[in-house]
Amino acid sequence: MLAAFAVATALKAAQTDACTLLTPEVIRQATGEQVANTKGTSQTAGKVRQSQCFYTLPTFSNSISLTVTGPAGLSRDAAHEMWERWFHRGEAGDEKDKDKDKDKDRGKPESEEEEAAASAVPISGVGDEAFWVHSFVGNLYVRKGNRFLRISLGGKMTDDQRQAKAKALAAVALRRL
């Protein structure tokens, strides 16, 4: 009976709906705009499940995307392993990744996320670990346990303003995760 409860709990945790983590009121407080539309999607790829919520705002460039990546099914470490590959690739003592790098294009990133993570800046004060990745929008990646969030913000703000808003939104989302 206890094993069945553990399985059900693990499956429920893996199936977090990103749209339940931030309310329209929280988005309004962060941006000053009302949410015009919310669209959620999810997908499972191998041992990882992603749930994404796109919060459309009246000023479209200010819209926010929240993605939750977690284990699919009972593979509890899959999302954490993805995080480690993206943000800690090639760190000293990581023999397993070094062997993979030799076999995969001599250490070149396998995905756009890994390529972006190569320029990530560590951020303190949110989650177990967090990184800021700047592209044409700002992306805050925050890990908590074996899951992680990505909050993407656009709009006409400085990078510091985007980081501050993303950290505030992440803090709310992590409390509901």
Image: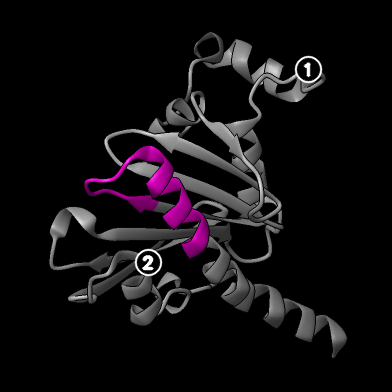
Quarter containing the C terminus? bottom right
Residue 109 to residue 19: above or below? above
Crowd band around label 2 with a 10 angstrom C-alpha radius: few (<14), some (14–19), many (20+): some
Task: Please give the range of residues in magenta.
Answer: 152-169
Q: Which mark is residue 30?
A: 2
Residue 106 vertical placement versus 150 (above, below): above
Residue 131 placement, left or right of 111? right
The amino acid type of the residue labelled 2 equals Ala
Q: Quadrant of residue 24?
A: bottom left
Q: Which mark is residue 25?
A: none
Looking at the rendering, in which quadrant would you find the N terminus? Answer: bottom right
Residue 150 visible (yes or no): no
- Residue 115 visible? The answer is yes
Which residue is depicted at the point 43% across and 58% down? 67
**Magenta stretch contains residue 86:** no
Amino acid bearing label 1: Ala
What's the colour scheme? one colour
Asked whether 157 or 131 is in front, the reply is: 157
The main secondary structure of the magenta stretch is helix
- The residue that mark 1 highlights is 92
Residue 133 percent across, percent down from the top left: 45, 35
Quarter occupied by residue 148: bottom right
SS at circle 2 = helix
Task: Please tell me which residue lies in front, 68 or 99.
Answer: 68
Question: Percent position (x, y) of residue 165?
Answer: 43, 56
In this rendering, the answer to whether 72 lies above or below 25 is above
Magenta stretch containing residue 153, yes or no?
Answer: yes
User: Looking at the image, is mark 2 or mark 1 earlier in the sequence?
Assistant: 2
